[in-house]
């Protein structure tokens, strides 16, 4: 073992002593290879990624853009923002770009946290950003989903107080895969945004036949819509997200992003631009996902695991009556799933992978 490896080992031990995982640390091991990081024998059904991506056009664009990575990417990121403005029928002033939509949720949580008060959110929902809001002193008001695992919009409205700074709605909802009815959600946004910021997370909307609420941001200063290239566009690892909001609101959000123009790498912006034009890839992902999801739900239910109807690339199901050890069965088959989200009813979630992966899932659980 050479000195550098010894040094890395010591740094690793030091990092472990600080209670940080290796993901939190920065280390460069000469044995590193993509093979190690993305073991081909493992089936990843934990993070709702697109198993077919990136699109062929995005891959070519990334390769071509590599040699431009010595330059900052303001121009290409602006080009991407203009393309997104056209696609969403808004102006580029209505857009803020970010490395993944997590970074948008983070900025919005920090923006809301500039004032004291609370935030209202469904439970369970996508909640990583909630820790930021709470760390800044906002109190969480959680509202349970309905029995059929949908957002309870009426109860959320009633939970809003004069102290509410932020209301979060994930449509479709992660982890349940359910959607809000369009007109009902529209009238909810109109009412909730009179008192607080509404953060609408549309990370999975492209898997559905639903329309975006984008048009509302032109007139409503209290609505922010988060979007991502991580899901249907198959670019989770490239980290590209953005938000749509009123131009005055975008200006305020950009104040919380240091040097907003360079938030994305040249490679990521190029990939996103190319993906936007790859309709063949988007359509085939949607169709493959639908078929694999139908198959997986049929199989899970045959095995005795009831599922919530899903509009997305993941499925929410109850393990209450499943007699085997679900997580052990997954482990034995080298499948990575998630966790129990609700102990009552033992609700868990699985990502819809390829048809072959869903066949492996069925075999592992049956
Ligand atoms: C609902 C929802 N919003 C946002 C994100 C964050 O995605 P990203 O930061 O990759 O854009 C995820 C990731 O799984 C998600 O499920």
Image (cartoon, grey):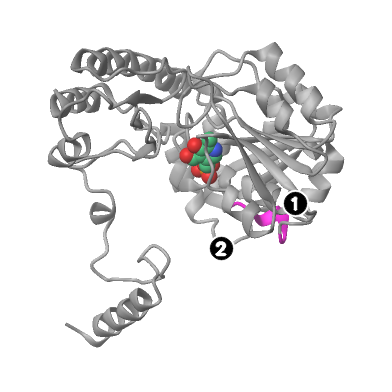
> In the image, residue 322 lies at what x, y percent?
21, 25
Question: Is residue 227 rendered to the left or right of residue 20?
Answer: right
Whether residue 89 is visible, yes or no, is no
Name the residue: 57% across, 53% down. 131
Crowding around mark 1 (Cα neighbors within 10 Å: few <14, some 14 to 19, many 20+) is some
Which of the two labelled residues, at mark 2 and mark 1, occupies the earlier sequence position? 2
Front residue of 322/273: it is: 322
> In terms of secondary structure, where does tag 2 sit?
loop
Instruction: Name the residue nearer the viewer: 111 or 229.
Output: 111
Q: In which image quadrant can residue 259 be found?
A: bottom right
Region rendered in magenta:
258-264
> Where residue 275 sits in the image (x, y, percent)?
52, 32
Instruction: Residue at 17%, 40% (x, y): give it.
Output: 328
On the image, numbered disc 1 is attached to which residue? 111
107, above or below 300, in the image? below
At x 57%, y 46%, the residue is 102
Check residue 70 in the rendering and tell me which mark sits there, or answer none.
2
Residue 186 image-quadrant placement: top right
Image-based side of 4 in relation to 212, left or right:
left
Q: Would you identify the image quadrant in which residue 145 lies?
A: top right
Q: Position of residue 235 (x, y in %)?
A: 46, 40
Numbered circles on residues, count: 2
Q: Is residue 185 magenta?
A: no
Q: Which quadrant holds the C terminus?
A: top left
The question of residue 259 being in magenta is answered with: yes
Q: Where's residue 306, x and y in %?
A: 31, 17
Q: Is residue 81 visible?
A: yes
């Amino acid at each position: 073992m050479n000195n550098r490896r010894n040094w890395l080992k010591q740094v690793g031990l030091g990092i472990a002593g600080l209670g940080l995982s290796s993901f939190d640390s920065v280390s460069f091991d000469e044995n590193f290879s993509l093979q190690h990081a993305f073991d081909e024998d493992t089936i990843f059904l934990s993070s709702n990624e697109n198993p077919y991506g990136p699109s062929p056009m995005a891959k070519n664009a990334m390769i071509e853009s590599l040699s431009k990575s010595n330059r900052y990417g303001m121009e290409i990121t602006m080009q991407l923002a203009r393309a997104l403005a056209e696609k969403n029928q808004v102006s580029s002033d209505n857009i803020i770009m970010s490395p993944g939509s997590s970074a948008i949720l983070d900025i919005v949580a920090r923006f809301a946290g500039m004032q004291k008060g609370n935030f209202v959110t469904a439970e369970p929902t996508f909640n990583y950003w909630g820790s930021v809001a709470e760390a800044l002193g906002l109190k969480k008001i959680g509202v349970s989903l309905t029995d059929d695992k949908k957002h309870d919009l009426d109860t959320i409205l009633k939970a809003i107080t004069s102290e509410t700074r932020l209301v979060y709605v994930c449509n479709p909802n992660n982890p349940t895969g359910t959607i809000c009815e369009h007109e009902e959600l529209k009238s909810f946004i109109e009412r909730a945004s009179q008192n607080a910021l509404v953060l609408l997370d549309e990370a999975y909307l492209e898997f559905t036949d639903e329309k975006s609420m984008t048009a509302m941001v032109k007139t409503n200063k209290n609505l922010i819509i988060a979007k991502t290239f991580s899901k249907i566009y198959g670019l989770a690892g490239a980290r590209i997200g953005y938000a749509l909001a009123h131009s005055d609101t975008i200006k305020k959000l950009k104040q919380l992003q240091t040097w907003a123009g360079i938030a994305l790498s040249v490679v990521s912006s190029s990939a996103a631009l190319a993906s936007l034009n790859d309709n063949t890839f988007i359509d085939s992902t949607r169709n493959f996902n639908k078929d694999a999801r139908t198959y997986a739900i049929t199989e899970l239910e045959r095995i005795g695991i009831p599922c919530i109807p899903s509009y997305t690339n993941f499925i929410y199901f109850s393990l209450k009556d499943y007699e085997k050890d679900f997580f052990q069965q997954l482990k034995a088959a080298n499948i990575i799933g998630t966790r129990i989200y609700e102990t009552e009813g033992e609700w868990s979630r699985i990502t819809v992978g390829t048809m072959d992966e869903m066949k492996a899932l069925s075999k592992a659980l049956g």
